Amino acid sequence: MRTLPRSFYARSAVEVARGLLGKILQHGDARARIVETEAYLGTGDAAAHSARGITPRTRVLFGPPGHAYVYFIYGMHYCLNVVAEPEGVAGCVLIRAVEPLNGLAGATEGPGKLTSALGLTTRFDGTDLTRGPLRVLAPNDAPAIEVGVSSRIGIRAAVDLPLRFFIEGNPFVSRPSKPR
């Protein structure tokens, strides 16, 4: 397996969200297959953290692609996002669910569960995914997948956009829920 290059992430958030499906998320010895993602489109997307522009919290979203954006939500969960788009243009991909391959304990369907299983917190915010302790790998023998598309879940704004992507039939895909 090889680490994905920065050029993989320097594309539209939608392309990166689709492209991450089937890739391997690695933290230390733990590895998991990415099975569900959501694209967030930057300043034009009312559901994106970057919609209001650059803030101390969102600065990483406007930086070089291929970095992690990790934030704390609802006072209890961490969420892992991958920065997409060329530098200066905000965009990211939320990793919603992974399929455990090795070294993971606990449930992994849903963004809070997967970060808990991988031991990810805000200390990983800004981590370079092309050379850090947290990486995304291209598997040597990736099976063909069928990509499902739906609206994003768990958000209040821009709820009808078809920006959630998942591997059809994978049992680790999170279950749709009504927007909060």
Image: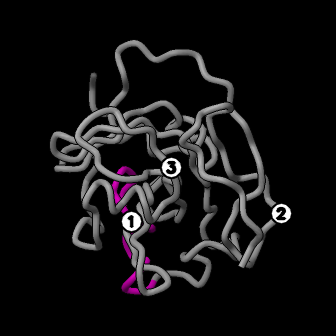
Mark 2, residues whose alpha carbon is within 10 Å: few (<14), some, or many (≥20)? few
Q: Can residue 83 be seen in this view?
A: yes
* Tag 2 near tag 3, CB within 8 Å: no
Give the residue drawn at x 44%, y 68%. 62
* Residue 60 falls inside the magenta stretch: yes
Q: How many numbered marks appear?
A: 3
Image coordinates of residue 9 in percent, x first then y, are: 44, 44
In the displayed structure image, the side of residue 111 where residue 100 appears, left or right: left
Name the kind of residue labelled 1 in the image.
Answer: Tyr
The single residue placed furthest to the front in the displayed view is: 106
- 84 with respect to 177 (left or right): left
Residue type at the position of mark 2:
Asp
Estimate how packed mark 3 is, as few (under 14), some (14 to 19) or many (20 or more) residues with alpha carbons within 10 Å: many
- Span colored in magenta: 55-69
Location of the N terminus (image quadrant):
top left
Label 3–label 1 contact, CB within 8 A: no
Q: Mark 1 points at which residue?
A: 69
In the image, taking residue 163 as reference, residue 93 lies left or right, namely left
Does the magenta portion include 156?
no
Marks 2 and 3, the one that precedes in the sequence: 3
Percent across and percent down for residue 64 are: 36, 57
Q: Residue at x 61, y 55 (%)?
A: 39
Marks 2 and 1, how far apart at CA: 24 Å
